[in-house]
Image (spheres, coloured by chain):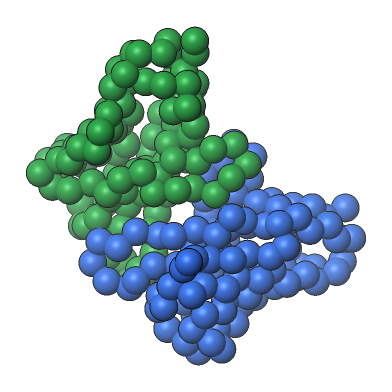
């Protein structure tokens, strides 16, 4: 079945450590996205990529980095510069045309202590 | 003003009730619209796209009002399983940023 896989589901890290969240899709979608969600809040866009080897900052890119070396993969690194990294991170993809909706992975819940 | 606004709720309704949510958007160039459902601690899942002429899927009806810049979601005969947060999503294409913008969500609690 086609879909988006995020791993791990839960991740615990000590403050000051970088951590990379994995996102893989086999839907053949060009566009991929990372969102962050805090308790009781909506989704905020961190980074997005419309094509391999290209990506753009979203609304809250500070303290994060991404790469898009392959169409299927869009990993997100949460660096030690991110002041409040504890959150629910959601990866999504879509066909980059018209009215196509977003398809989400099942998320990674990151806790930094 | 936020680009996409929703009443956060919660809407507490009895089973069988009809409930309606609105979502307003600020950019008149917005071109596509969606409703997503999100259960607690899970990822959002597409409920329905919203078409200009309005569309229906079983107990759910979505409508778009471009003149007043809002979309709506109507749920008829609500079930306990409809309890979730409903997210309004808008695609704004002329900002140079081709990404979808989410509202903060409206929480629905259907009670027995």
Q: How many marks?
A: 0
Specify whether A58 is left or right of B52.
right
Considering every residue shown, the one lying at the far front of the view is A1
Reply above or below: B56 against B89: above
| Residue at the image position 49 percent from the left and 75 percent from the top | A26
* A26 is higher (above) or lower (below) than B17: below
Q: Is residue B9 above or below residue A61?
A: above
In the rendered image, residue A51, in percent from the top left (x then y), is placed at 42, 83
Q: Residue B60's spot in the image, x, y percent?
A: 27, 32
Residue B76, image quadrant: top left
Residue A65: x and y in percent read: 64, 75
Q: Colour of chain B?
A: green
Q: Give the left or right position of residue A85, taking residue A104 as reference.
A: right
Q: Quarter of the image holding residue B58?
A: top left
* Residue at image location 50% in from the left, 41% down from the top: B38
Q: Which residue does the image show at 43% across and 73% down from the upper left?
A: A27
In percent of width and height, residue B70 lies at 24, 38
Observer-nearest of B68 and B108? B108
- Colour used to depict chain A in the structure image: blue
Look at the image and tell me whether residue A77 can be seen: yes
Answer with left or right where residue A88 lies relative to residue A69. right
Q: Is residue A105 above or below residue B56?
A: below
Residue B4 appears anywhere in the view? no
């Amino acid at each position: 079945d086609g879909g988006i896989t995020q791993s791990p589901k839960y991740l615990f890290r000590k403050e000051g450590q970088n951590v990379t969240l994995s996102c893989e899709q086999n839907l053949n979608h060009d566009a991929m996205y990372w969102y962050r969600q805090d308790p009781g809040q909506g989704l905020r866009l961190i980074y997005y990529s419309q094509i391999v080897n290209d990506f753009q900052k979203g609304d809250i890119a500070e303290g994060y980095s991404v790469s898009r070396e392959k169409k299927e993969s869009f990993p997100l690194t949460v660096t030690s510069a991110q002041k409040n990294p504890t959150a629910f991170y959601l990866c999504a993809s879509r066909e980059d045309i018209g009215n196509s909706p977003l398809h989400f992975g099942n998320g990674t819940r990151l806790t930094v202590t | 003003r936020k680009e996409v606004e929703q009443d956060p709720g919660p809407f507490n309704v009895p089973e069988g009730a009809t409930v309606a949510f609105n979502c307003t958007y600020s950019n008149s160039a917005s071109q596509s619209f969606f409703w997503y459902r999100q259960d607690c601690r899970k990822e959002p899942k597409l409920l329905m796209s919203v078409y200009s002429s309005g569309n229906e899927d079983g107990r759910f009806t979505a409508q778009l009002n471009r003149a007043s810049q809002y979309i709506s979601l109507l749920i008829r005969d609500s079930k306990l399983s409809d309890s979730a947060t409903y997210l309004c999503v808008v695609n704004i294409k002329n900002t140079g940023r081709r990404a979808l913008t989410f509202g903060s969500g409206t929480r629905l609690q259907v009670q027995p």
